[in-house]
């Protein structure tokens, strides 16, 4: 049998295999009767396997895919395999390469420690911020958005690294207490709100009953005022529970609609009835406006006295035309008054006497109108009452003008 040689070992003619190390040559096995070359190749392949293990460790550490603790365990395992291995190759070189990994592992361990400390510091700052925000929410009154935010803060807390037990417990106690306080206050708020809404529903039921009782009234003015008062009380009652608020409002509004629809129809009928009065008053206005500009004050006054009587006698006009027609008549009255003011400055006692006579006539007319109004009220003639009230108002206005003129003569 022949022997086989290798740079890091040999196989002798008896089939014994040796490896060269720094401590000298060491026998690693024997294959009696075997081919020395094949025996040598077997032990070389064993070395190559160990070399691959070392290369993998180096690559994983370099690539950051192996943590320092796991790396230390892997190095120790491979070192046991290399130290005293039955393999032919540079075993001392492999051990040196494993030794070279120790400072790399130490560096990774320090880096990992620094990263952990940074994460813990970040987690501590984040948890302190969460506790601060939770306490602010707990002291506030954002009952809807606050609940969502509290849940989001809890989810964020769960993702953060744990701190030392004392610090972590203190921050968690602050956060948990804030959540408990907020939840208790929120429940109390909605409980109180629910009670208020239930009470509002009771109040609004009563208001609906009042509105429905008024819906058939034909006393348009006072009833319109009553509905305005009901609306004020409705708003002051606050909101009822959501599932009934709209229903209550529809019932309340429906009662009002019945009344106001009837009132509008009645007013429309009156407006149509008053249209003929408007035609008469339009002619009176044209006659009055022909007095302008004032060139004969006494004639204008006499004409205005007659116009005032016929104006009152003509009756009401449609509501849409009241402001316009009254405004046109007042413009003529003001022009006559202005001309009178100027003339009174230059007048004589006879004109003062005429003013006294006018006041007497107006006063008598007012007394007669009041008596007629009392009779109409006694007979409950609503239409006549309205006409006489309008006439009384106009004549009292003329009396006021006459009395002012008399005062200017004094």
Image: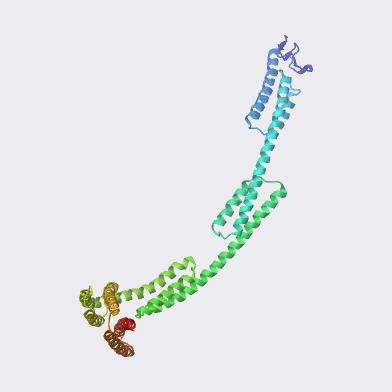
**304 sits left or right of 34 in the view:** left
Compared to 329, does 21 lie above or below?
Answer: above
Give the residue at x 49% y 67%: 241
The one of 214 and 394 positioned closer to us in this rendering: 394
Give the residue at x 33% y 73%: 261
In percent of width and height, residue 163 lies at 69, 46
Quadrant housing residue 230: bottom left
Specify whether residue 124 is in view: yes
In percent of width and height, residue 61 lies at 66, 29
Compared to 364, does 10 lie above or below?
Answer: above
Compared to 225, does 111 lie above or below?
Answer: above
In percent of width and height, residue 344 lies at 29, 80
**31 sits left or right of 210 in the view:** right
Specify whether residue 71 is in view: no
The one of 275 and 76 positioned closer to us in this rendering: 275
Farthest residue, direction right: 23
* Quarter that holds the C terminus: bottom left
């Amino acid at each position: 049998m022949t022997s086989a040689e290798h740079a890091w070992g040999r196989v002798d003619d008896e089939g014994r295999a040796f490896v060269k190390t720094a401590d000298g040559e060491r026998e690693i096995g024997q294959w009696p009767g075997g081919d020395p070359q094949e025996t040598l190749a077997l032990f070389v392949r064993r070395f190559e396997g160990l070399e691959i293990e070392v290369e993998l460790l180096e690559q994983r550490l370099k690539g950051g895919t192996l943590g320092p603790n796991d790396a230390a365990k892997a190095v120790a395992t491979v070192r046991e395999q290399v130290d005293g291995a039955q393999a032919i190759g540079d075993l001392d070189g492999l051990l040196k390469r494993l030794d070279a990994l120790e400072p790399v592992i130490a560096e990774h361990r320090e880096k990992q420690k620094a990263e952990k400390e940074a994460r813990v510091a970040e987690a501590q700052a984040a948890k302190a911020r969460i506790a601060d925000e939770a306490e602010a929410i707990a002291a506030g009154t954002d009952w809807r958005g606050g609940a969502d935010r509290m849940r989001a803060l809890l989810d964020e807390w769960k993702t953060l690294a744990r701190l030392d037990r004392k610090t972590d417990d203190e921050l968690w106690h602050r956060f948990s207490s804030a959540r408990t306080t907020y939840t208790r206050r929120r429940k109390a708020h909605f409980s109180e709100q629910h009670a208020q809404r239930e009470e509002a529903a009771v109040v609004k039921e009563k208001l609906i009953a009042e509105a429905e009782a008024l819906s058939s009234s034909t006393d348009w003015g006072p009833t319109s005022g009553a509905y305005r008062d009901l609306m004020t009380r409705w708003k002051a009652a606050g909101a009822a529970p959501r599932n009934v608020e709209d229903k209550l409002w529809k019932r309340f509004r429906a009662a009002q609609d019945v009344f106001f629809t009837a009132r509008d129809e009645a007013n429309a009928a009156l407006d149509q009835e008053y249209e003929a009065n408007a035609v008469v008053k339009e002619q009176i206005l044209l006659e009055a406006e022909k007095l302008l500009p004032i060139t004969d004050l006494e004639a204008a006054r006499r004409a205005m006295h007659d116009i005032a009587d016929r104006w009152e006698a003509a009756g009401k006009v449609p509501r849409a035309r009241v402001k316009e027609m009254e405004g046109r008549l007042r413009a003529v009255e003001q022009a006559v008054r202005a001309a009178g003011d100027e003339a009174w400055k230059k007048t004589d006692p006879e004109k003062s006497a005429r003013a006294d006579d006018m006041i007497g006539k107006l006063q008598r007319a007012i007394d007669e109108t009041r008596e007629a109004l009392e009779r109409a009220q006694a007979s409950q003639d609503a239409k006549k009452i309205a006409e006489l009230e309008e006439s009384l108002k106009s004549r009292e206005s003329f009396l006021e003008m006459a009395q002012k003129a008399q005062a200017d003569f004094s």
